[in-house]
Amino acid sequence: PVLIVDFGSQVTQLIARRVRESGVYCEIHPYDKAGEALAALKPAAIILSGGPASTTEEESPSADPALFDAGVPVLGICYGEQTICAVLGGKVESGHHREFGRAEIVITKDSPLFAGIGAVDHRETVWMSHGDRVTAIPAGFEVIATSAGAPFAAIADEARRIYGVQFHPEVAHTPRGAQLLRNFTHGIAGLDGDWTMAAFKTEAIARIRAQVGKGKVICGLSGGVDSSVAAVLIHEAIGDQLTCVYVDTGLMRKGESEQVVSLFKNHYNIPLIHVDASDLFLGALEGVSDPETKRKTIGKLFIDVFDEESSKIEGAEFLAQGTLYPDVIESVSAKGGPSAVIKSHHNVGGLPDYMKLKLVEPLRELFKDEVRVLGQELGLHADFVGRHPFPGPGLAIRIPGEITREKVQVLQDADAIYLEEIRKAGLYDKIWQAFAVLLPVKTVGVMGDARTYENVLALRAVTSTDGMTADFFEFPWDVLGKTATRIINEVRGVNRVVYDVTSKPPGTIEWE
Ligand code: XMP
């Protein structure tokens, strides 16, 4: 594997993505735990990430010298290069010559790092983002590329196989950055790129069997991709030692509960307890219009219901969860202090401590797109694993104001038409998330010769890579027009449709 040491860059996860895309397993660990990670992971190569700090300041994070003594190749990116220089005896100065954005490097010396990219004098476009720069390199190093703002744009100690680049090969704006990383992991470190989803699946099954033995496992299905993939994987490992519990809140998309139940029960033959708790949830939400109270009410009730059902499964020792890698990575950038709570994301499946079940989390090493590939490897349909994210509190946070069964149904019907039109237009996979919001606002319309006075429905569609920031999706007008016409004609209770063109920030993706 490759050890990625995180110094707090916003794009550290991208390094991991690129490395994994080339078929090499890697893990991200914070710089202050790099020594432990080195011992535990026994990596064949090490990559030091970028970061916001300056090595010229005291107490700035620095690379553990043990990393350079491990005898394996090291690549420092941006701050990573600077910390190599600071630790091994070079010099870094706070830049009077800051470089941000597109830049050009010139290769000044042949190096295996540039294999297939270029030889001496070749110019290559890269993406830079640095204030400090290296002004002297440690003994044993030589410059292998320069740029206008960074005379030490790339450096190498070929004998010790330690490399530093001032630019960011992991971002898409460095067109041949993936090739450079591959040169490092495959060419220089000699890894052969045999980490595939098929291999992961086999290993994961073996690990689940080893962890669980003859024990019983409970898995809370949310209807989402992660818990579904986890359940199918675990079932493949231990068969009917697994029981799934699906708490139907009545707040899912149209037809989704039926889909989940039929997929698991009939298709996969996985023991499934389907709890229809919609009366309970809608009852508890009666009169509630504050978004945070909605979330808390649903979160608490969910745990109560799940708890009650799973306590009926005798002798269960394990609880399966679809935790993903981004939730596991100890983020250096997140250590910067408390960030404001915008929404209390209740994640379905969180359980009180007193249940004392041991966790089985077979997806903890995977990114979302890898989970999708694994799902397909397990026979789940591409449409199913490619579904847009759906919030735990479901449609409750897409009905501003009070929730009633009738409103939920109107929203389900309208939402289904919207998604159907998006799929028909071939746009579903271009959109991160699309959904309708039923507004508590009535407006006047005219249908036939009669006046109508009904609710407004808002359509939302955004592009995003992680849900943290988002842009509204630019629909062709005809798709929006057709969707609006169909919804108003086919769904009783809606007589006007509007499209939300707010990006995030300043908006959020959901309306509540
Ligand atoms: P916002 O609205 O915060 O949403 O921009 C970002 C992403 O998170 C989802 N979301 C939630 N997911 N429980 C969840 O499990 C929640 O309470 C919740 N609120 C928002 C949202 O759908 C989007 O994908």
Image (cartoon, grey):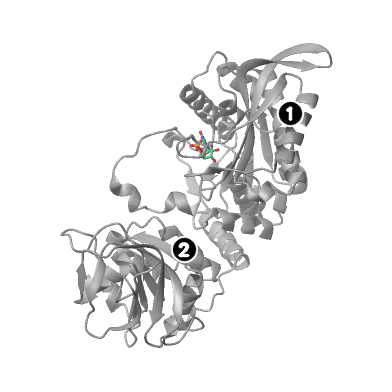
Amino acid type at mark 1: Asp
Per the rendering, the mark at residue 388 is none
Q: Is residue 284 left or right of residue 148?
A: right
Residue annotated with mark 2 = 171
User: What amino acid does circle 2 point to?
Assistant: Val
| Dot 1 and dot 2 residues touching (CB under 8 Å) | no
How many neighbours does mark 2 have within 10 angstroms: few (below 14), some (14-19), or many (20 or more)?
some
Can see residue 255? no
**Residue 155 % position (x, y):** 32, 79
Going by the image, does 149 lie left or right of 464? Answer: left
Tell me which residue sits at (59%, 28%) in the image: 398
> Which mark is first along the chain, 2 or 1?
2
Q: Position of residue 284 (x, y in %)?
A: 56, 18
Q: Secondary structure at mark 1?
A: helix
At 53% from the left edge and 51% from the top edge, which residue is drawn?
465
How much space separates mark 1 and mark 2, taking CA atoms?
A: 41 Å
Position above or below: 187 against 252: below
Q: Looking at this view, is 233 or 143 the one in front? A: 143
Secondary structure beneath label 2: loop
10 Å crowding of disc 1: few (<14), some (14-19), many (20+): some
Q: Whole-percent x and y of residue 234?
A: 61, 53
- Using residue 279 as the reference point, say whether residue 450 is left or right of it: right
Q: Is residue 58 visible?
A: yes
Q: Which mark is residue 413?
A: 1
Give the answer, above or below, for where 317 lies relative to 211. above
**Residue 65 higher or lower than 171, as above or below:** below
Between disc 1 and disc 2, the foreground one is 2
Q: Closer to the camera, 250 or 338?
A: 338
> How many marks do you count on the picture?
2
Q: Nearer the viewer, residue 474 or 167?
A: 474
